[in-house]
Amino acid sequence: MKNENVFLWNGKINIPQEGEFIKLKSDRNMDVPDNPVIPFISGDGIGPEITPVMINVVNAAMEKAYGGAKKIYWVEALAGDKAEEKEMERMPQETLDLLKRSVVSIKGPLGTPVGKPGKSLNSILRQSMDFYSAIRPVYYLGQPTPIPDPERVDVTIFRENSDDVYMAIEYMAGSEGAKKVRNFFINEMGVKDASIPEDAGITIKPMSEFKTKRHVRKAFRYAINNNKKSIAVAGKGNIMKATEGAFLNWAFEVAKEDEFKDKISTEQSSPSGKIKLSKVITDQMLMQLVLNPNAYDVIITQNLNGDYISDLASALVGGPGFVPSGNIGDGYALFESTHGVGMDIAGKGIANPLSITLSGAMMLEYIGFNEAAKLVYDAVKRTIYQGNGTRDIYTGFEKLDKKAVELSTVEFGKHIIREI
Ligand code: NAI
């Protein structure tokens, strides 16, 4: 990357004088300058191949939209393998500090070494700035897909990111902890022995009103600002009444708050002009997403269900390689590719750069650079509609007997830039 607005790590984080930091105001709204500093983490595996493509595409869109009047100053922060190579922690404190100071940032995939102790880097990042909502818009761009009429898919999934079984409060079968927890439930809570066998492992699933409601409010605001027609809250409330059932009820309580009561309806037949809110059992939703994806506009759900639902929805449009994502808290935001490090294809120049590139466009929208974001979306669509793409797109088109051109990761990026 030789762009004059990209500032690589050079023994330390290299902050340009020309760039200004985005500021978070006391109401948690952002003050975005015309020359924001945006940190990026290239990531592991295919990360260093796809991240520069995103930066080049976003730069081209910014230049076309604003002719130099607005410009991003990209600052590299290390994490993962690259940090380890420099004999730093895999998630250095200086990286966390920069991300916090900059408010908005973007990253490629980071690997979690199997069999080594330590928390996943993604978990450290998500918890460090309390990115409590993971947002994944899933839509069709013209790529090969496993379902007919994929234009029926246009859904934004809000996955709660800070609650649920992901809190890792777990007791392995046979451990002292599992024995203690089992004894407590049997002796103090009156649970029958047979419900928790002696050889059971136990995972705790906390779900809180505060965490649910702040997540739901974020999704409601998104639905209102983007003129969505319906919102479905998913969960297995019929089985897990204290957690997922409560989540569904809390969502309905939020709909009654002053901010939302005139805009969101909880009635069966929603009055015109109001967004219809409904509860859907997760398994029903997974089935309906395949059979009738246009039934869903915005989905709000918990952490674990959100994992399943977003992967299934991504598969409908060809897989996570085509889907962007943002982790968002109160103002702070970290955008990222949804796929992993793709070790099997790393270094071959064939990785699909769309997930991180579209995450870059999502980030542009988040900071209010909507004109540039639209240029990226339109250019990506035109590039794919012409049958151009990386190997995954090319082989998908071939299977459908469609004429296609195979491009390397870099060539694909250049093609998108030519379409901007
Ligand atoms: P993976 O996404 O790396 O690979 C699954 C398959 O998809 C592979 O065949 C790979 O070649 C392919 N693939 C992935 N991205 C692609 C792209 N952009 N273009 C073309 N093909 C692509 O998932 P896996 O193997 O489950 O995870 C590998 C590592 O990635 C693990 O260490 C995991 O923790 C990490 N990971 C990181 C994530 C993040 O940083 N947000 C998300 C998911 C996994």
Image (spheres, rainbow, N blue to C red):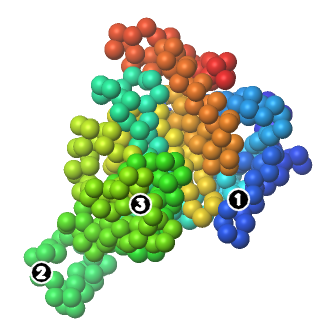
The amino acid marked with disc number 2 is Asp
| Dot 1: element | strand
Can the viewer see residue 190? Answer: yes
Residue 183: x, y in percent?
Answer: 22, 85
User: What separation in Å lies between label 2 and label 1 (alpha carbons)?
Assistant: 54 Å
What residue do we see at 77% from left, 42% from top? 72
Q: Whole-percent x and y of residue 95?
A: 69, 56
Q: Could you tell me residue 277's position as x and y percent?
A: 35, 58
Name the disc covering residue 264, or none: 3
Residue at numbered disc 1: 30
Circle nearer the viewer, 2 or 1: 1
Horizontal and vertical percent position of residue 276: 35, 55
Residue at screen point 44% across, 48% down: 228
Q: Nearer the viewer, mark 2 or mark 3?
A: 3
Which comes sooner in the sequence, label 1 or label 3?
1
> How many labels were placed on the picture?
3
273 up-or-down from 142: above or below: below
> Which residue occupies 24% across, 69% down?
240
The residue carrying pointer 3 sits among few (fewer than 14), some (14 to 19) or many (20 or more) residues within 10 Å by Cα, namely: many
Residue that lies at the very extreme toward the right in this rendered image? 17
Mark 2 and mark 1 lie on one chain; the one further toward the N terminus is 1
| Residue behind mark 2 | 193
User: What amino acid does circle 1 point to?
Assistant: Met
* Amino acid on which disc 3 is placed: Ile
Q: Nearer the viewer, residue 209 or 43?
A: 209
Of circles 1 and 3, which is in front? 3
